[in-house]
Amino acid sequence: MLRIFKQKKEGLTDQELVTQYKKNGEMLYLATLYKRYTSLIYGVCLKYLKNSQDAEDAYMGVFEKLVKKVRQHDIKNFKNWLHVVVKNHCLEILRKQKKVLTISYDQELMQNEPFVHPFEESPTEESEKRLSDCLKQLELKQLEAIQLFYYQDKSYKEIAETKNQPLGKIRSSIQNGRRNLKICMEGFQNFNS
């Protein structure tokens, strides 16, 4: 009996299957449609995701989307509509992956410029004292990162490994420390003007 019932569903057009699924919510109608377009769904997933494992995962996720979306939309041409749904699903996956995408780069090439006194070509004894005073006002993390980067000529990567911290935190400490030093030095300069 189930076999006859299943064969009847497979003989229906896409539009009839969509109508029946919307009407009574019976999953066999939707499963028949899904099975009918298996190669299209998987092919689109593979085209966008470029990886068979990711494509298989996305293929399974499409069915979950269809359960809700078929009931919400007025579908005139199921195949074309399905193609758009699958494509959008894959693009959504790619966007999520991009948010956590790790880009490989050579940390040795990261910013590693010599420390140049912000106000004078050749620092004077007075400006060196001001700089020393400003360094003492930095937060400990900023001070340590600045000293390692500028005075010991360490790269971001070396500092991150030494401090056992993420590279981004080290970069942030150096940038914030440099900004705070500049503000402090400008304050001394404006105070003496």
Image (cartoon, rainbow, N blue to C red):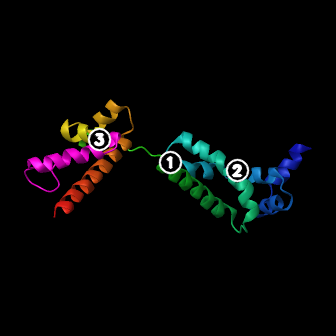
Q: Is residue 164 above or below residue 111?
A: above
**Residues packed near mark 2 inside 10 Å, few (<14), some (14 to 19) or many (20 plus):** few
What is the distance, in whole Å, between disc 1 and disc 2 at their CAs? 20 Å
**Which span of residues is magenta-colored?**
113-142
As drawn, is 116 to the left or to the right of 24? left
The residue pinned by badge 3 equals: 143
- For the N terminus, give its image quadrant: top right
* Residue 14 percent across, percent down from the top left: 74, 60
**Residue 114 shows in the view:** no
As drawn, is 137 to the left or to the right of 73? left
Image depth: mark 3 or mark 2 in front: 3
Q: Which of 21/132 is in front? A: 132
* Residue 127 percent across, percent down from the top left: 13, 50
Identity, as a three-letter code, of the amino acid under mark 2: Glu
Q: Tell me the element at label 2.
A: helix
What is the distance, in whole Å, between disc 3 and disc 1 at their CAs? 35 Å
The residue pinned by badge 2 equals: 64
The residue pinned by badge 1 equals: 97
